[in-house]
Image (tube, rainbow, N blue to C red):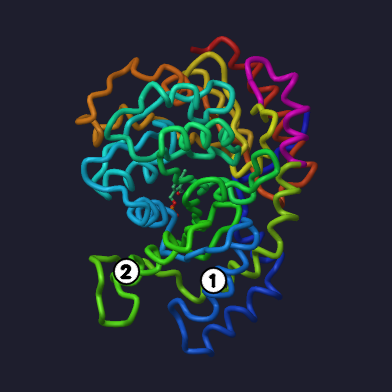
Amino acid sequence: MTAHMHVPLTDLAGLYASIRDEVDPAVQRVLSSGYYILGPEVESFEKAVAAYCGVPHAVGVASGTDALELALMACGIGAGDEVITTPFTFIATVESIVKCGATPVFVDIEPHTWNMDVSLVEGRIGPRTKAILPVHLYGQACDMTRLMELARAHDLRVIEDCAQALGARWNGQVVGSFGDAGCLSFFPSKVLGALGDGGMVVTGSGEVAERVRILRNHGARTKYYHLVNGFNSRLDSLQAAVLRVKLGHLDDWLRARKSLAALYGDGLLSAPGIAAPEVVTGADHIFNYYTVRVQGGKARREALAQDLKERGVATAVYYPVSLHLQQVYRNLGYKPGSFVESERAQDEVLSLPMCPLVSEAQARYVVDSVCEAAATVRCAG
Ligand SMILES: Cc1ncc(COP(=O)(O)O)c(C=O)c1O
């Protein structure tokens, strides 16, 4: 019998402590500068992220949600347009489509990656379709080869939701650099997390970048000269300074995440009725979340989560209700059964602790706990 341990989903304070001697001077520098919104700290962080993503432009905004909305607007998406996306994602993806006046059109997901099933996209393209919004869920890229071919063939814009996938690659190319724009989130639990909210639009297009720059700052290029109706959506200097320090550690942290995923993957082979995440050929999964499928449905997933909680292992469900079944989107006319894979996923996904600081002993404890719990709750549901 293994001794009881506590394994949190992530350890943000621990990550800060591990780089405190770099973060604290960066914070002090900003405090003493008297420059707190945008400015040189944001500019140098934007340059660093653009280089990291292999694109010429990056524009810091207030959140990942704003990054999506501003990118859609900058790509000319608005009232009367349709945007094809996945129902199995965080609500911000779809909120941003609705906020810019367009209509989300869902396609179901692939069962093995939980990403949008690209083979279903063509069937949903109509005269009002203007864009495709793929989400690289949990940190694994969508099939961007097929998606970009389709977008080119139908002259559609592509806005990538990379909120969970900074640094993930498809055939060696970093996500966010395929489409017209890539949207990043620096929400604290993301692989590159701020001390609050933050986001960024990365793009190969100078025009899109310039539009986002104007939109984020009350629609003005020059202060008090407003060209369009804009937003107050700027990245704080403090966040940029801290994020730039963290960006220097990102590759090490992603390596640690991948090693932990490999350890989990091997160990979970002996967990009955638990399927470890599949990494498809071409994808370089960065495991923002390590999500398994609990076979046997919702009741078994919940019993397993409760059992793990009692053993000290934290878990989370991203996401328990597919967006086509949310009350807020009833007007779109979808029903239970509209997207069977998304509905199966909402009942079966379970995310395990994932953080660069999880020790080998903790990882083994998680694996042993899942194996034991899965054997105990074998028949429930
Ligand atoms: C897939 C996805 N899209 C968009 C967002 C929105 O990002 P933010 O919380 O920074 O607004 C998130 C994360 O919260 C997300 O997971």
Q: Residue at x 66, y 26 (%)?
A: 276
The image quadrant where one finds the N terminus is: top right
Q: Are marks 1 and 2 in contact (CB under 8 Å)?
A: no
Height in image: 142 above or below 227?
above
171 relative position to 73: left or right: right
The residue located at (29%, 32%) in the rendering is 326
Q: Is residue 182 above or below residue 285?
A: below
The image quarter in which residue 313 lies = top right
Residue 274: in magenta span: yes
Q: Give the magenta-colored segment's residue range.
A: 259-276
Cα–Cα gap, marks 1 and 2: 17 Å
Mark 1 closeness class: few <14, some 14–19, many ≥20 residues within 10 Å: many
The residue lying toward the viewer, choosing from 96 and 367, is 96
Q: Would residue 347 appear left or right of 52 to someone viewing this image?
A: left
Residue 214 position by quadrant: bottom left
Main secondary-structure element of the magenta-colored stretch: helix
Q: Amino acid at mark 1?
A: Ala
| Residue kind at label 2, given as amino acid type | Asn
Pick the residue in front: 144 or 91. Answer: 144
Comparing 298 with 319, the one in front is 319
Residue 30 image position (x, y, % from top left): 54, 83
- Residue 199 percent across, percent down from the top left: 47, 60
Residue 228 lies left or right of residue 221; in this view the side is left
Q: x%, y% of residue 344?
A: 46, 19
**Residue receiving disc 2:** 232
**Residue that badge 1 annotates:** 240
